[in-house]
Amino acid sequence: MKISWHGHSVVKIITADEKVILIDPFITGNQLCDLKAETEQADFILLTHAHNDHVGDTLTIAKKSSALVIANVELADFLESRGLNTHGLQPGGSFIFPFGKVTMTPAIHSSSYTDADGTNYPLGIATGLVINLEGKTIYHAGDTALFSDMQLIGNKFSIDLAFVPIGDNFTMGPEDAVQAVKWLKPKRVVPIHYNTFPLIKQDPQIFVNELGDTGIVPNIGESLSL
């Protein structure tokens, strides 16, 4: 399995059998991203919530590659109405997909999508994702504030790799993210959701320095092996 971060909250997983999983594929308009929506292919797309900087290029990629889109029920239903193949989950729920098991967790954030014509659609709630595949556990926190139930997530799952937001303003900042890591107890941590916009400018190295050997700041597109 190969895992890479592509700016903002975009994570790409390539399984041992070459299946491609994209999480929150905000590519177009993401100045940090090295991917191209026109050429990117996926077998599965996982979405933490409906904001445009997370849904991103889901419609473009999923339509051309027939990817299954996994999201909260309201967002999944919305995307299904746009012609996509979807599977809806809600926090607390799990489902076993061909690549592994996905458990949807809570997050403290809002969730709405703004269409090209300016129409805004409230679409359920924001979530995090725990993904169990190939004997490893990955936690993508999505956009969230620090919340005490992260202790429960850390106690329930043995997390090998966690992606946590540090940008502040719209999510928790570095200080709260350090506390989140203490509760989650992952083996490795990658900071996400920072430096895409001026409002979320952060130095990720300051954050990982607080974590000892746990934290890592990968280069954009750098492959991490689990």
Image: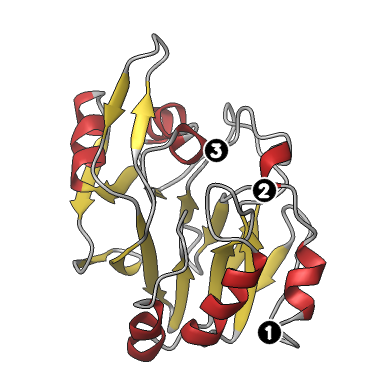
Q: CA distance from mark 2 to mark 3?
A: 9 Å
Give the secondary structure at mark 3: loop
Is residue 1 something one can see in this rendering?
no
Tell me the kind of residue under disc 2.
Gly
Residue position for label 1? 214
Q: Which badge, 3 or 1, comes first in the chain's sequence?
A: 3
Q: Which badge, 1 or 2, comes first in the chain's sequence?
A: 2
Residue position for label 2? 7
Is residue 190 something one can see in this rendering?
yes
Q: Which mark is residue 26?
A: 3
* Quadrant of the frame with the N terminus: bottom right
Residue at left 53%, top 54%? 171
Quarter holding residue 27: top right
**Relative height, residue 211 to residue 64 (above, below):** below
**Relative height, residue 7 to residue 147 (above, below):** above
Give the secondary structure at mark 2: loop
